[in-house]
Amino acid sequence: MTFRPSGTSMVPLIRHRQQVIVAPVDPSALETGDIVLARVAGTVYLHVVSSVDPAKRRVQISNNRGRVNGWTGYARVFGICVAVDGVARKGAADKTVAAGSNGSS
């Protein structure tokens, strides 16, 4: 999925209206610092993973300015940002899964 998010909460990682590419992800492979598309408390964010809790199968999502949005389960992590304006995000492609796979095996 390719789109241009709006807002400034992810500057300098992602600037307003930069093109991002998001691919399906294996949530169990996520690490702090990964940028993900996830639903937290009813809102979908393209934000940073700020903490990982593998025992409870969840990640904490934050913007790039220190605001914590909250915890969300692996099932609500829809994808990982693999590129911004054509520049690949280091290590992100290794965490992707084929579309239609749930990545939870």
Image (spheres, grey):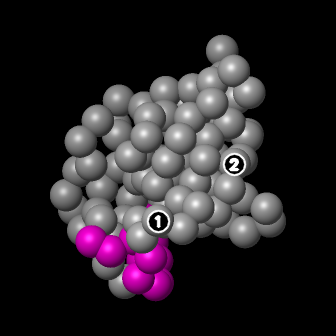
The residue closer to the viewer here, 25 or 28, is 28
Look at 19% across and 58% down and name the residue there.
87
Q: Would residue 4 be counted in the magenta stretch?
A: yes
Q: Viewed as shown, does residue 50 lie left or right of 81?
A: right
The amino acid beneath tag 2 is: Trp
Where the C terminus falls, by quadrant?
top right
Q: Viewed as shown, does residue 85 lie left or right of 59?
A: left
The residue closer to the viewer here, 42 or 69, is 69
Q: Viewed as shown, does residue 100 lie left or right of 97?
A: right
Real-space CA distance between mark 2 and mark 1, rounded to the nearest whole angstrom: 14 Å
Q: Residues within 10 Å of mark 1 (few under 14, many from 20)?
A: few
Figure check: 65 above or below 94? below
Residue 60: percent from the left, percent from the top? 61, 47
The amino acid beneath tag 1 is: Gly
Residue 8: percent from the left, percent from the top? 41, 82
Residue 63: percent from the left, percent from the top? 49, 66
Element carrying mark 2: strand
**Which residue is under mark 2?**
71
In this orientation, does residue 37 appear? Answer: no
Q: To which quarter of the image does residue 92 belong?
A: top left
Element carrying mark 1: loop
Residue 71: percent from the left, percent from the top? 69, 48
- The disc at residue 74 is none
Q: Residues within 10 Å of mark 2 (few under 14, many from 20)?
A: some
Q: Which residues are magenta?
A: 2-12
Query: Which residue occupies the extreme front position in the image?
Result: 66
Q: To which quarter of the image does residue 86 belong?
A: bottom left
Query: Which residue occupies the extreme top position in the image?
Result: 105
**Which residue is under mark 1?**
66
